[in-house]
Structure formats: structure tokens, C-alpha cells
Amino acid sequence: MGTPVLEAKHLGIAFGGLKAVDDFNISINEGELVGLIGPNGAGKTTVFNLLTGVYKPTEGAFFLCGKKMNGKKIHQVVQAGIARTFQNIRLFKTMTVLDNVKVAFGMKFKYRLGSALFRYTAFWKEEKDIEEKAIDLLKIFGLEDKANYIASNLPYGQQRKLEIARALATGMKLLLLDEPAAGMNPTETAELLACINVIRERFGIAILLIEHDMSLVMKICERIVVIDYGITIAEGLPEEIAANPKVIMAYLGADDEEGELLEEDATGKSVTEKDAVKVSGKEAVNEQGKE
């Protein structure tokens, strides 16, 4: 497969005596989509913060296309080719939809300050080129007709899409999506799933996804890594993760043999929470197979 786009080796961070992430390892190849899941507080977003320069690892290292990234500042990480979205939308809300995307092209501007100040030909030529590229990205998400809207006036689901479009404008090699479906209704989630598939087909970029919507995770991810209390407890295919006892225990706190009574099925047979999660996971995998 060649050099992985992302490779983390024994990555970890401690805050005082608390290890938030311990011995985290992952490898993602070009065009691959991997899910990172775990209960609330498991350390998922902390992993993203390590990979984007927000936090500095106290252990281990991570590499982008073979280049060591430890110690890089946030803007250097972006320039190298890692972009992300956030749990809480972070758009430039008073700017237009188009300008939100154009600003992400900023590091690619080639004209000089003089051209910008005096509006020379080089300035207008590059501005036109950037605008065309921004519109192309908006078309992927069906937002081209909203180009001149103020970002804060978009519906929630469209703001989520705009944030991903802005991330794509950085020209990244690795895209980190932090709960992109959070707050979306089923229709918006289905649209998002379709958009992510288009992104992979068109750009061939590697994607690492954090998401609590297990149906989405099972449908779209090729592999899944599960962490709990900052430690990796499972890794494998979606169907393997759905039936993994350690994963079920981490989410529900039930042991491998027993679970609290959740309900009775149609025949009156007791159904435990553990069993319900297994069924949910298998249904999602089966649904993926049908598609």
C-alpha cells in the first residue's frame, strides 16, 4: 500500500498525573475511511487535538505521508495537509458562505501585497480562480445557490456541510471529521453520507471520523478503532466491532454474560441492552451490504 497517509505510533498525552490518551496506534492509507469511536470522555477529540497540533504529545509520534509532525504548530499542520471539523461548528458566521470557503485558500495566494493593495491584474486573475474553485466545492454540497448568504443564516445541517467544504479548500491529504452528523435529522445525515462518499471518490483523501451515530459509522467506515479511557480496546471491520464484547461493555457497562433487562421482545423473551446493541450493529452492517 506504500507509505500511509497517517501513521500514529504509541501516541499519548498526560495532563499532570492523568493519561488522557495512552499508546494510541493507527495507520490510514490514501482514500481510506476509518472510524474512531468510544463512549463520552474516551479521548477521541483529544486524539484529534494531538493530530492537529492543539496538544503536544508527551509520548510517541505521528507521521503524515512519512513526515514526522510532532512539535508542529496548528498552521503548520494545516499547511502540511491535515484539516479538521469540530464538534461545535466554527464558521466565520458574519461572512458569506462563499467567503468562508475562499478564506481557506488563503495560504495558496501567490500575488503580493502590492497587487492586493492596488488591485493589479494578478490580483483579479487569482481572485477569480479562487472563487471558481470555491463554487466548485460548494456544488458538491448543494450550497452554490447559497454562496452569498451570511453563514449564520444557513440551517444547521448546511452549516455542517459548509464547515467540511471549508476544510476541503485547504487541499488536505487527511480530513478529520469530529461528529459531522451531530444535531442532524435522518434526512440531513443521509445527505451528509452521500457527500462524504463523493469526497472520497473525487479527491481520494484519507478520512478519520469520530461519530456517535452508529448507523452512519457502520455504513461508511471500512475499519473502526474503539478507545475507552484513552486506551485502544478494539480494532477491526464494522461487523467485528458490532459483536465485540469489550466494545459492548465499554458502552453499556454490562459484563460479557449479563446485561440489565431492557425490554421483552415480541415473543416475551427478555432482551438485554447488550443484545440490543448487537442487533443494532448487525442491522447496520446488513443494511450496508444491501446498498
Image (tube, rainbow, N blue to C red):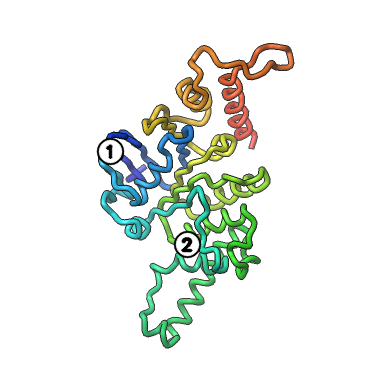
Q: Quadrant of the N terminus?
A: top left
Residue position marked by numbered label 2 in the rendering: 169
Question: Mark 1 — residue?
Answer: 16
Mark 2 crowdedness (10 Å alpha carbons): few <14, some 14-19, many ≥20: many
User: In the picture provided, is 117 more to the left or to the right than 270?
Assistant: left
Estimate how packed mark 1 is, as few (under 14), some (14 to 19) or many (20 or more) residues with alpha carbons within 10 Å: few
Q: Which mark is residue 72?
A: none
Judged from this view, the residue extending furthest toward the front is: 16
Task: Locate residue 201, reporting x and y percent.
Answer: 52, 51
Q: Nearer the viewer, mark 1 or mark 2?
A: 1
**Mark 1 is on which residue type?**
Gly
Separation of marks 1 and 2 at Cα, in angstroms: 37 Å
Between 281 and 204, the residue placed more toward the observer is 281
**Quadrant position of the C terminus in the picture:** top right
Which element is circle 2 on?
A: loop
- Identify the residue shown where x is 59% and y is 62%: 152
Q: First in sequence, mark 1 or 2: give its number.
A: 1
Position of residue 171 measured from the top left corner of the image (x, y, whole percent): 43, 60
Taking depth in this image into account, of 5 and 39 the one nearest to the observer is 39
